[in-house]
């Protein structure tokens, strides 16, 4: 397997990598889910509560390219709050989506059973935000409540599929990603490994009860300076 640089020159671009996922085609009658996460070399998914200190410009490019090509961004309320979500895409990416007849920003979906969506910049930027909930509480301004009898990941994906949203990029956090993996809904995992040792009690990219485990196969490896980009798919 060749180790390629993840750049527009001298290697594969983030745009090419994401186009190869064929996100919007769905899989097995449900939306396709590509998760994107970052972790330190010792497996921590955050430093002081945020993933930003782990990042690299090419990691940011990959994240935003996934958003640009996705039908919907799935993210947990804890991650929305911790990362202060806003300004999802760069101007050229918004223009590219508009030229394809898509909304300039993909809608953002989150699971909030008690309808406690945090107030983050995203809610004030004209982005459609869907909150899947079991609560009758009135949603915050800028949020559309999608009420389900039981909120679990298969039900959420089924509703997204009914809305024609077949390409999902999941940005975590660790609890949500665990649910995606546990329900057999993970189709691609794009994991960036940062050249840092973080220690402490920050979570790994998964949080919660132990899994089966879920076996993966390595599809691609890329690098940017000392950051590694690992593309996994579920093992057959």
Image (cartoon, helix red, strand yellow):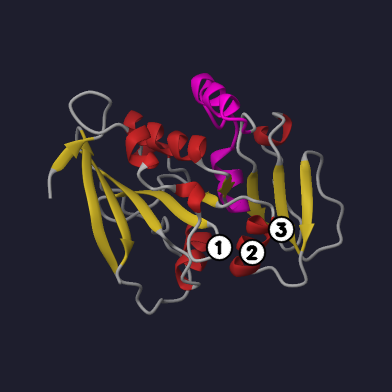
Alpha carbons under labels 3 and 1: distance apart: 17 Å
In depth, the one of 136 and 126 nearer the eye is 126
- Mark 3 or mark 1, which is nearer to you? 1
In depth, the one of 121 and 161 nearer the eye is 161
Number of the label disc, if any, that sits on residue 30: 1
Q: Position of residue 43 (x, y in %)?
A: 31, 56
Question: Is disc 1 placed on a helix, strand or loop?
Answer: loop
Question: Is disc 3 placed on a helix, strand or loop?
Answer: strand
In depth, the one of 194 and 34 nearer the eye is 34
Q: Are marks 1 and 2 in contact (CB under 8 Å)?
A: yes
Mark 3 / mark 1, whichever is N-terminal: 1
Q: Is residue 198 visible?
A: yes
Residue 87 sits above or below residue 188 on the image: above
Label 2 crowd (10 A; few <14 / some 14-19 / many >=20): some
Q: Are marks 2 and 3 in contact (CB under 8 Å)?
A: no
Question: Is disc 2 placed on a helix, strand or loop?
Answer: helix
Q: Is residue 170 visible?
A: no
Number of the label disc, if any, that sits on residue 158: 2
Q: Which residues are magenta?
A: 76-102
Residue 30 sits above or below residue 46 on the image: below
Q: Which residue is mark 3?
A: 132
Residue 101 magenta-highlighted: yes
Q: Position of residue 151 (x, y in %)?
A: 69, 68
Mark 2 / mark 3, whichever is N-terminal: 3
């Amino acid at each position: 397997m060749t180790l390629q640089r993840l750049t527009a020159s001298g290697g594969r671009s983030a745009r090419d990598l994401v186009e190869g996922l064929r996100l919007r085609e769905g899989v097995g009658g449900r939306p396709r889910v590509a998760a994107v996460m970052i972790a330190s070399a010792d497996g921590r998914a955050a430093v002081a509560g945020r993933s930003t200190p782990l990042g690299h410009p090419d990691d940011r490019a990959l994240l935003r390219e996934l958003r640009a090509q996705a039908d919907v961004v799935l993210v947990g309320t804890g991650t929305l709050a911790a990362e202060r979500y806003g300004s999802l895409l760069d101007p050229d990416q918004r223009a590219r989506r508009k030229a394809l007849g898509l909304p300039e920003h993909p809608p953002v979906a989150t699971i909030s059973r008690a309808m406690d969506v945090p107030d983050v910049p995203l809610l004030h930027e004209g982005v459609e935000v869907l909150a899947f909930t079991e609560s009758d509480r009135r949603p915050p301004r800028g949020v559309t409540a999608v009420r389900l009898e039981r909120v679990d990941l298969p039900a959420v994906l089924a509703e997204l599929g009914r809305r024609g949203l077949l390409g999902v990029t999941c940005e975590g956090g660790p609890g949500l990603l665990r649910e995606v993996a546990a329900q057999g809904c993970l189709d691609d995992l794009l994991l960036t490994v940062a050249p840092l040792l973080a220690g402490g009690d920050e979570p790994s990219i998964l949080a919660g009860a132990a899994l089966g485990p879920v076996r993966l196969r390595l599809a691609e490896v890329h690098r940017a300076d000392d950051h590694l980009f690992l593309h996994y798919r579920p093992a057959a």
